[in-house]
């Protein structure tokens, strides 16, 4: 089922008019049988997969995806947080509203909201890094130099800065046993 959603997200770049990278865009979905857990509502992990599909749809509709793929660059999630407010059940049609919040020195930040009509069912904030074919980070300046219309704010909202800082604080006290990496180094801070 997710493979079909990914294919549909990729096809959207050919059937919808281009939009500026910075405007909110809506991707529509429907809860399928394979999305459900034993309690008959959409499983928590499926929300994260849907967020991926909605971001790919967003990048395709703004023209960014084509330029990333040409250069063999790809997006990876480095951090995310999601709040679940209401369950989504079998057959429910819902939409995911994706809005880029801006860039810092290494990541682009998105706000994504699951809605059924005007009712919010879940809300997420996602930090995404663009990597090149060798796995090295692509700077936001290189991304902004692509022939795509960007209209994201020049600074991140204060609440996003606080969210990033809270993860840096957690990284100061939590390390991955036996490894030199921390949440901090993945988000773009010192390692």
Image: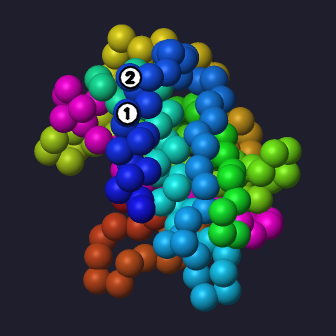
Residues in magenta? Answer: 68-88
Q: Which quadrant does the N terminus fall into?
A: bottom left
Q: Which mark is residue 11?
A: 1
Furthest toward the left, the residue is 134
Tag 2 and tag 1, C-beta contact below 8 Å: yes
Mark 1, other Cα within 10 Å: few <14 / some 14–19 / many ≥20 = some
Query: Is residue 73 positioned above or below 15 on the image?
Result: below
Relative height, residue 32 to residue 130 (above, below): below
> Left or right of 116: which side holds 4?
left
Applied colour scheme = rainbow
Percent from the top left, x then y, of residue 177?
35, 84
76 horizontally vs 134: left or right = right
Q: Is residue 79 magenta?
A: yes
Which residue is label 2 attached to?
14
Q: Which mark is residue 145?
A: none
State the residue in front, 41 or 101: 41
User: Picture coordinates of residue 97 (x, y %)?
Assistant: 66, 40
Secondary structure found at label 2? helix
Q: Name the image quarter holding residue 155.
A: top right
**Quadrant in which the C terminus appears:** bottom left
Find the distance from the CA under tag 2 to the CA under tag 1.
6 Å
């Amino acid at each position: 089922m997710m493979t079909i959603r990914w294919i549909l997200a990729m096809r959207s770049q050919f059937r919808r008019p281009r939009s500026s990278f910075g405007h909110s865009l809506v991707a529509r979905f429907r809860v399928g049988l394979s999305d459900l857990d034993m309690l008959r509502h959409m499983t928590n992990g499926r929300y994260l997969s849907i967020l991926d599909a909605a971001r790919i749809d967003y990048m395709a509709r703004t023209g960014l995806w084509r330029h990333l793929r040409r250069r063999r660059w790809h997006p990876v999630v480095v951090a995310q947080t999601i709040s679940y407010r209401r369950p989504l059940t079998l057959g429910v049609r819902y939409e995911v509203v994706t809005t880029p919040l801006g860039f810092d020195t290494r990541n682009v930040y998105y706000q994504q909201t699951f809605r059924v009509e005007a009712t919010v069912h879940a809300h997420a904030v996602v930090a995404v890094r663009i990597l090149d074919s060798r796995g090295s980070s692509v700077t936001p300046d290189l991304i902004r130099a692509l022939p795509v219309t960007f209209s994201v704010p020049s600074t991140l909202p204060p609440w996003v800065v606080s969210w990033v800082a809270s993860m840096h604080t957690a990284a100061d006290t939590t390390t991955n046993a036996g490894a030199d990496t921390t949440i901090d180094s993945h988000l773009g801070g010192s390692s």
